[in-house]
Amino acid sequence: MAWGELPQAAAGHNHLVWIAILSALAIVGLLPILRCKRRIATWHSRISMMICSATILKCLYFFMSNAPSHYYVAFIDEAGDPGLNTVRPIDKTGSTEWLCLGAIVVKATDEPKIGGWVSAIKSKAEIKGPVDLHYRNLPDFRKTIVCSELAKLPLRAFILTSNKKNMRRHRNPRAERYSSQQWFYNFCLRLLCERVTQFCYEHARSQRADGRLLKLVYSERGGHSYGQTIAYHELLKNQAKAGKLFLTKRRIYWEVLDWRLAEAVSHKSCDGAQLADILTSAFYQAVDTLPPTKWDNSFAKLLRPVMAKENGSYMNFGVALQPTPPSKGKLTDQQKEIFEFYGYAFFP
């Protein structure tokens, strides 16, 4: 198979997506009927619907349980929120000025080692007891330790930082048709995935290895539908095939993705998600200058050894800033510092 083609495991899964959608609809449609006290449907129809739903779920389980193996894993977390209706500091109260999405990428062979890495970091930082590693709960001296230790690990890190002031009250009706109220989060996730998938694709290509797939692991947050995110990615893939993408400067490398290789996990239960939290929260603290955040960019600077590069540069790859051009963000001098550290230049 030539480079640039979709691997067999990643191609032609539109019918599987529809199975997932149909199974969800079957469950949603079934529960109200089963709970209804009035005899809206006969027992015969209820049983028929149960059998139909069970059959669809059985098919879905078959496809999910036969997911292909992966070579890379990306643990994804966020800091800030995607709200656009009101945005600080333009509005006195409202959504955060920044939304940051971060990804920690490791080889699948190193995935079993992550628990040991986290335990070693906690030990070094003298974090006692069976508590999860959560950046925001750490005093500064422990943040220094955990970021320094993370920077020594065999992984690559990516951060997408979006300053939302220029997006205040912005709407994207085209995107909203497909991804409801979370279209802005999905858009930022797309920008992050463009860089992560490019890195994995080029790493595999450098080793002359076809078909190496990437698994996406999302750290759960309340109110977010990861099913909508998967559907949005399928839409982008179909638009790419048809040559109808609206943004073409970069692209998601679908060659390394398979929709079955994606899951959402709780922060507490996933050591990889805890590493992603350190990365994302450190950069959020480096850019957010509004209370209650205690602005400090020293921790994000410590992560430099593991931030991904493109042609020797962190700028707009391992460390990406939105909007483009950065002048649209109207950043303060404090906010600019972390980006200048990673290679950005700002002009009057």
Image: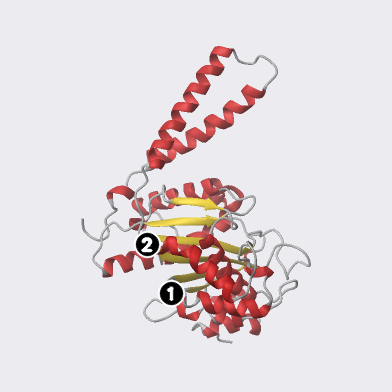
Please report the residue visible at 73 percent of the width from the left and 69 percent of the height from the top.
Answer: 90
| Quadrant in which the N terminus is drawn | bottom left
User: Which of the pair 332/278 is nearer the observer?
Assistant: 278
Quarter where residue 74 is shown: bottom left
Please report the residue visible at 43 percent of the width from the left and 37 percent of the height from the top.
Answer: 61
Quarter where residue 89 is shown: bottom right
Residue at the disc numbered 2: 109
Tally of numbered discs: 2
Q: Which mark is residue 322?
A: none
Q: Amino acid at mark 2?
A: Thr
- Residue that sits furthest to the left in the current view: 1
The x, y position of residue 136, in whole percent, is 67, 69
Lateral position of residue 104 relative to residue 197, left or right: right
| Quadrant in which the C terminus is drawn | bottom right
User: Which of the pair 129/146 is nearer the observer?
Assistant: 129
Q: Does residue 24 lie above or below 161 as drawn?
A: above
The x, y position of residue 95, in whole percent, is 70, 62
Q: Amino acid at mark 1?
A: Ala
Quarter where residue 66 is shown: top left
- Residue that sits furthest to the right in the current view: 92
Ranked by sequence position, the earlier of labels 2 and 1 is: 2
Q: Which mark is residue 308?
A: 1
| Element at label 1 | loop
Residue contact between numbered discs 2 and 1, judged by CB atoms under 8 Å: no
Please report the residue visible at 68 percent of the width from the left and 66 percent of the height from the top.
Answer: 96
Q: Nearer the viewer, mark 2 or mark 1?
A: 2
The x, y position of residue 19, in whole percent, is 43, 35
Say if residue 272 shows up in the picture.
Answer: yes
